[in-house]
Image (tube, rainbow, N blue to C red):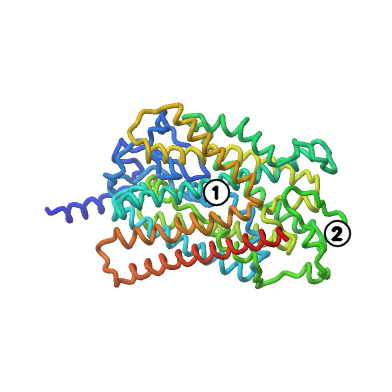
Amino acid sequence: MDPMELQKVNIELDNQSNSGESLEDNYTEVADSEKSAITSPFASDDAESQKFLTNGYLGKKKLEEYNEEYHRGRTSFGMSTFNLSNAIMGSGILGLSYAMANTGIILFIVLLLSVAILSLYSVHLLLKISKEGESLIYEKLGEKAFGWPGKCGVFISVTMQNIGAMSSYLFIVKYELPLVIKTFMNIEETTGEWYLNGDYLVLLVSVILILPLSLLKNLGYLGYTSGFSLLCMVFFLIVVIWKMFQIPCPMDSDIMNMTLVNVTLAPLLDQNITSDDMCKPKYFIFNSQTVYAVPILTFSFVCHPAILPIYEELKSRSRKRMMNVSYVSFFAMFLMYLLAALFGYLTFYGKVEPELLHTYSAYLGADVLLLIVRLAVLMAVTLTVPVVIFPIRSSITQLLWAGKEFRWWRHCSITVSLLAFTNMLVIFVPTIRDIFGFIGASAAAMLIFILPSAFYIKLVKKEPMKSVQKIGAAFFFLSGILVMTGCMTLIILDWTQNVASDGH
């Protein structure tokens, strides 16, 4: 019997089996994405010695010898869907109402649906190249496709995406923690107290809470962080829908709190706009801020570094089954994103800020329900930052010190450097919109559009370049280049215009 026939027999036997047990005992569990922690009880105690799929957490194993027919995984369809939903869901949901306010309802829905469909196509490409490249490590696929530059391209893109995620989480601390303190201390107006300064509070939280957690070698005890974060966002969505029916339009500008940290609504209120215009939804909008819509959406749908480890642990695994997991997860997140954006926009219309939760303080002030949401979100993001630092540090270690013994000085220096750099971004970058825009236009575009299509064209040898699949991947690659260069150019132009206007 030749090898091809033997392989066919193995596939048929695998399809007939209903057992969820692995045929290989040397495989370990996997947790999920940048927005998740190590949930596996099988993870190695020496976390720094593990191999990571960028955002995913993999135990010690030879994934280069990965064979789809011989390891079907242990994770059910429902749990895989939950893990992928965790990977998709993140702080990007807080900026979607702002994106809708600057695109209009119809244009936003078209863009949201387009990004979701293109992200699903990108997942399809990733699953295909994992089979052809015989590896479940994103960096290894990059190395097989383009050598060291391909490996570095994946590493840089995922590191930038994770730093952007950390920055967005710390921006939430910067925005929301001063408001929580004001509510508890019953402070009506700020007079420059240091404990109400978002920059000081970010540094304080980073040093007292985030740094000690990030220095741990094992983050297994944070295993439920991603689930808690997802529940917080679901709670946030419920509150957004509820508050839309409580806040009347037009909002009385006399009771708007104009002392919000780092965000001002004064230019919006000074405009000569009638109440009817203010409370009338717009369906198509084009302005200087519209350029941020696509990067915010791409930032919100990035989950691709988590696709392969979730696929690797899927029970009765097949590409079709994993695509079904992706369809369910993306559809659920599409609905959540659409509802959060729509109800947030219909609450504040043109006054919505880049961070939606912060907008409510301008009208409601010390609201008990919003206070609960803020506390839950603050706790979730504070616990998530160490989880995001963990794979970046491990990837840096694997890239620069592969095979070297664990050293505390190296472990601590990488952690402190990453956290210090992220704090500098949060302090000096004006708004969370800039983080969403820049990372969405660069790292997210690389992870969704450019890298999967480039690896597909290079690694899938059995399809000629003139085939429909290769032509589609080539167009996908070109569209990624267009999205990246176009959005980055317009964002930089917007930044320069803002600097010029501030100078005058």
User: Dot 2: what SS?
Assistant: loop
Task: Report the amino acid beneath label 2.
Answer: Asp
User: Dot 1: what SS?
Assistant: helix
**Residue 418 in the image, given as x and y percentages of width and height:** 52, 39
Label 1: which residue? Answer: 164
Label 2: which residue? Answer: 252
Task: Report the amino acid beneath label 1.
Answer: Gly
Relative to 102, is 60 on the left or the right?
left
Q: Residue furthest front?
A: 504
Judge by depth and name the residue closer to the eye, 496 or 63: 496
Asked whether disc 1 touches disc 2, contact meaning CB atoms under 8 Å apart, the reply is no
Judge by depth and name the residue closer to the eye, 442 or 66: 442
Between disc 1 and disc 2, the foreground one is 1
**Residue 352 in the image, given as x and y percentages of width and height:** 72, 59
Q: Residue furthest left?
A: 1
Task: Place residue 231 in its image quadrant.
Answer: top right
Relative to 348, is 401 on the left or the right?
left
